Amino acid sequence: MNRRIVAVFVSVAFTVPHAGAQTAAPGSREVPAHTVPVPDTVSPQMRAIVGAPINANWRIFPKSAEEWKAQVKVAAANAVQTLPALREYLHVKVEARKIDGVNAFVVTPEEIPPANRNRLLIHVHGGCYVNNPGEAATVEAIFMAGFGHFRVISVDYRMPPDAPYPAALDDAMTVWKAALKMAAPTNMAIFGSSAGGALTLSMVLRAKIENLPLPGAIAPGTPMADLTETGDSFLTNAFLDNVLVAPGTGCDARARLYANGRDLKDPLLSPIYGDMSGFPPAILTTGTRDLLLSNTVRVHRKLRQAGVEAVLQVYEGLAHAQYFRDAAAPESRETFEEIARFFDIHLGK
Amino acid sequence: MNRRIVAVFVSVAFTVPHAGAQTAAPGSREVPAHTVPVPDTVSPQMRAIVGAPINANWRIFPKSAEEWKAQVKVAAANAVQTLPALREYLHVKVEARKIDGVNAFVVTPEEIPPANRNRLLIHVHGGCYVNNPGEAATVEAIFMAGFGHFRVISVDYRMPPDAPYPAALDDAMTVWKAALKMAAPTNMAIFGSSAGGALTLSMVLRAKIENLPLPGAIAPGTPMADLTETGDSFLTNAFLDNVLVAPGTGCDARARLYANGRDLKDPLLSPIYGDMSGFPPAILTTGTRDLLLSNTVRVHRKLRQAGVEAVLQVYEGLAHAQYFRDAAAPESRETFEEIARFFDIHLGK
């Protein structure tokens, strides 16, 4: 750590009201304004990502369905531009496929080791339930297929403003039911990050409700598991996370489009409020700067309290879902190789 | 989350310079001054602990050996006062015992299940290498013995200003060598938090150097594994952690007394810089507000990179080592029951 920064920080402290200051509720912490440099404890590739400017859309709320769609379209087009190089780098092939009426992509790595030949992963993408339609859905699936050498089906589920809850979950469940005819459920895992992490958990809750077979494992990454914005890191990591930035803002507004007036504590919207007993083994991923760090650790504790085998990986310095931004970053490889190892232990062959 | 707080937070944001402001290095984050309430996602018992005033000693640096000792003595006396009730609550007995010349305490739970009869845990206490002499050393050992139903030996190692490095580690190793005559090494685990977490790791490094048998498992809690103050959470959690508060302050000054001029990157002082290959299975514990959150997750990643079985538990809202403050808090029970379960899986009988 830069000694100069430390010195500045400590000197700032002398002017700061401490706990118990009259303006704050008892026990509140007064955090002084301060500057936090890019950590030197992350890889050079991640330094660029962690140090990137704050998400330009973080408090831009489109005013109409057309404006939403226009914003989503621009972001998706940008994401899609990066895909050919990503697929080539990770030796992965992607083909669009309709599965029982639902748009999806089959993501296939060049090499599939014998142990993974009868295994299949189902991917539900993130994007605050509004972003990443079409091929933009496939980014994380390509990382998983490339680093983990699994076949993946990525669900291009319907989204608001046209199709709010339960369209996304319905589409994901349609694909899950179709997948049950392709592989043994114990040979399959479901994974996804952010809204996809929440959908992963909601799919298991729905499968329990519908008495469908459960997957052999799941990997909910930094799940948007609590749409009520409950959780300490919404405030403790505010303005440190350059992706979600702060609560009460962009991603939450998008999630409310999805909820469409429904109670945000409905477990199928906010799975933290669901019954997680009987869940399959789970591996969760987050970063120390993630606005959803609390969401992630709360889900981890809740799974453990329910007696579920659940492990947690927390990456130094990373903000929300930055572990699938740059395939050349060692943290990306580490994240997906850890998930692959976990799946290898828990899935049938 | 309180909606009012969110609204205040977002409105503050509009006046804040974002990344790229001229005063900050590229990629730095500008965090505005803000108030963070006590999280409602922790237990009522923990709310009192997380919301307690900031550690009064956090930037009080005694100027002489006598002043150090006086400060340490007051803190230790306060801790010792709480011990009779704690021992009674957790049904644990503590007896002082000299082991090959080293002061120690034998901590014995009222009930020891058959599986734990031939098992033994070695505890190295925390306190920035300066605090918690004598019986004050035993707090965490009492939690572990009480919730986990293991016999524990807690090492009351020598400390600065009288006895800097390597006295503490030497004493801990003397007890480890003696313990090797009491139980099979595979039936034993080493644990401790903060400075004790670092000592746990340093003991394994020393045992490797001295070709001594390693324990069957370890539980380094929020380890002070990097005395150079490297790690993002030193800044991201500053003023949120009411125990360690901010870098460049109290605990680090105390650790430098221990280092006594030695290179802070020496792996036996800062085990993050050591070779962790061959380490026994490890369970690490921290909280989302912990100033050593980064230290903890960096050690976790380093262990995993070395191929070690290592799991991480991160508790919502907790600052540094708050999981052994109140035995009635459900988070305390959960922490030590998780560690006990991990030991049960990995230790011989």
Image: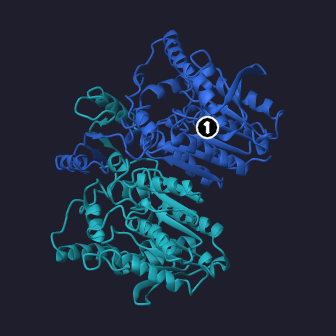
Chain colours: A blue, B cyan
* Residue positioned most to the top: A66
Residue A215 lies, with reference to residue B267, above or below; the image says above
Using residue B9 as the reference point, say whether residue B121 is left or right of it. Answer: right
Looking at the rendered structure, the secondary structure element under dot 1 is: loop
Image mark 1: chain: A
In the image, B251 versus A61, the foreground residue is B251
Q: Which image quarter is the N terminus of chain B in?
A: top left
Q: Residue at x 56, y 31 (%)?
A: A263
State the residue position of label 1: A267
Using residue B28 as the reference point, say whether residue B310 is left or right of it. Answer: right
Q: Which image quarter is the C terminus of chain B in?
A: bottom right
Residue B99 lies, with reference to residue A207, above or below; the image says below
**Image location (x, y in percent) of residue B132:** 34, 74
**Image location (x, y in percent) of residue B246:** 28, 53
**Residue B43 shows up from this direction:** no
**Image location (x, y in percent) of residue A167:** 66, 23
Q: How many marks?
A: 1
**Image location (x, y in percent) of residue A73:** 54, 14
Residue B294 lies, with reference to residue A92, above or below; the image says below
In the image, A160 versus A26, the foreground residue is A160
Q: Mark 1: which amino acid?
A: Pro
Using residue B129 as the reference point, say whether residue A287 is left or right of it. Answer: right
**Residue A126 shows up from this direction:** yes
Q: Residue at x 60, y 20 (%)?
A: A133
Question: Residue A209 lies in what quarter of the image?
Answer: top right
